[in-house]
Image (tube, helix red, strand yellow):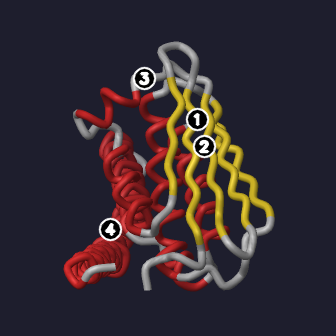
Amino acid sequence: MTTREERLRHLNRRLMEAYESERARIARQLHDDIAQRMAVLTIELDSLNQALPLSLSELRRRIGALSDRTRALGKDVEAISHGLHSSKLDYLGVVSASADFCRELSERQHVEIAFTHDGIPEDVPKDAAICVFRVLQEAVTNAVQHAGVDRVAAVLRGSADEIQLEVVDGGRGFDPDEAMRVRGLGLFSMQERISRVKGDLSIESQSGAGTIVRARVPLHRAVA
């Protein structure tokens, strides 16, 4: 590897670290500040609603509706926080973070997301774990939002040398080449992440025939 290639690789690694650090900072701010303040607001609205006399039923109803909307907004903020940065990825690993993400998205979007895993090592390097999680996050979200399906399957398979990801949906499909040209559906982001860890990404899709996203992330070659 030439000196120039080494500098570019180092710069890419630093940029990705800065990107993830900023995501983590914003996620903490959403979770620790805004979400907590909204929770207090919801409690105060509920308390006010309970304190009103029964004769003011219409006012009670409107305050109750405001409380419900505030609570729903708080859940959306929490979802954004988790989407930006999963603390479970740091402390519990890629399997737990991926499982929680799929479960929360399934509940929020009312779409079945079947997540399974097999043979994932406990000591996955941080760069590889972030890459796998972000690609899974992007691929599953794309399927839920754009494929028009009520079920998505996501599978992680691992060995000592690599992690393989497969996300399958039976939805409307698309033209992967065209999507890459216009940098649509987050495909460019997935490709960039995979390339940084010297992995492989393949997308099989056609109109009306669903989509299969496959990624391979080598553990021993993840960017140091």
Q: Which residue is mark 3?
A: 174
Q: Residue 47, located in which quarter of the rendered image?
A: bottom left
Q: CA distance from mark 2 to mark 4?
A: 35 Å
Question: Residue 56: x percent and y percent?
Answer: 34, 46
Residue type, label 3:
Phe
Q: Which residue is mark 1?
A: 212
Q: CA distance from mark 1 to mark 4?
A: 39 Å
Give me the disc on residue 167. Answer: 2
Decide if residue 101 is on the left or right side of residue 9. right
Residue in front for this viewpoint, 92 or 125: 125
Please report contact status of discs 2 and 4: CB closer than 8 Å, yes or no: no
Residue in front for this viewpoint, 32 or 141: 141
Single out the mark in the foreground, 2 or 4: 2
Quadrant showing the N terminus? bottom left
Q: Earlier in the sequence, mark 2 or mark 3?
A: 2
Q: Secondary structure at mark 4?
A: helix
